[in-house]
Image (tube, rainbow, N blue to C red):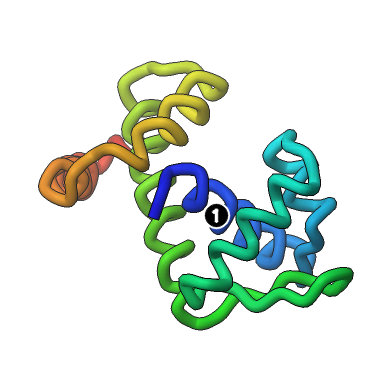
Amino acid sequence: MTKSLEDYLEAIHRQISKTGSARVVDVANILDVKMPSVNNAVKELAKLGLVKYERYREIQITEKGKQKAAAIYERHKLLKTFLLSIGVSEKNAETDACAMEHILSSETLGRLREITEERPDID
């Protein structure tokens, strides 16, 4: 799955978690993209079995999609927490975590998780 599709899936998951539903316009606003871009991404996510979508209806996330989105969010949260713990500003920690979550290996993420668990000063 591409970085872009991961961003769309994460935005859909966050929106549903926050408000109970996700519409194309919601995702477009979250990601600051045009609605046709969201429509194309949602179609791709549906082909992957991660969402269900009918035109002019709310986007529904499948169980497989929930699991994938939760894993993406956990990577993001872990990276942001680590960056904040080393003194990176909130704004930069958010931006950098979003960029890094797509490229770090499982090994690197695992080691970061171990480090944050070993250090009580890192929440």
The vertical placement of 19 against 25, above or below, is below
Image quarter for residue 45? bottom right
Residue 123, visible in the rendered structure: no
- Which residue is found at the position 57% from the left and 72% from the top? 46
Residue at image position (84%, 52%) is 25
> In the shown orientation, is residue 107 left or right of residue 91?
left
Q: Quadrant of residue 39?
A: bottom right
Q: Is residue 7 left or right of residue 67?
A: right
- State the image coordinates of residue 59 (x, y, percent, origin top left): 73, 70
Residue 111: percent from left, percent from top? 12, 44
Whether residue 56 is situated above or below residue 12 in the rendered picture: below
Q: Which quadrant of the figure contains the C terminus? A: top left
Which one is nearer the viewer's eye here, 113 or 28? 28
Nearest the viewer among 70 and 116 is 70
Q: Residue furthest right?
A: 56
> What residue is rendered at 17% in x and 51% in y?
106
Relative to 93, residue 65 above or below: below
Which residue is identified by label 1? 10
Left/right placement of residue 90 relative to residue 120 reads: right
Q: Position of residue 35 (x, y in %)?
A: 80, 47
Residue at (28%, 38%) from the top-left corner? 103
Q: Residues within 10 Å of mark 1 (few under 14, many from 20)?
A: many
Q: Position of residue 78 (x, y in %)?
A: 35, 45
- Badge 1 element: helix
Answer whether residue 30 is visible to the viewer in this image: yes
Report the amino acid beneath label 1. Glu
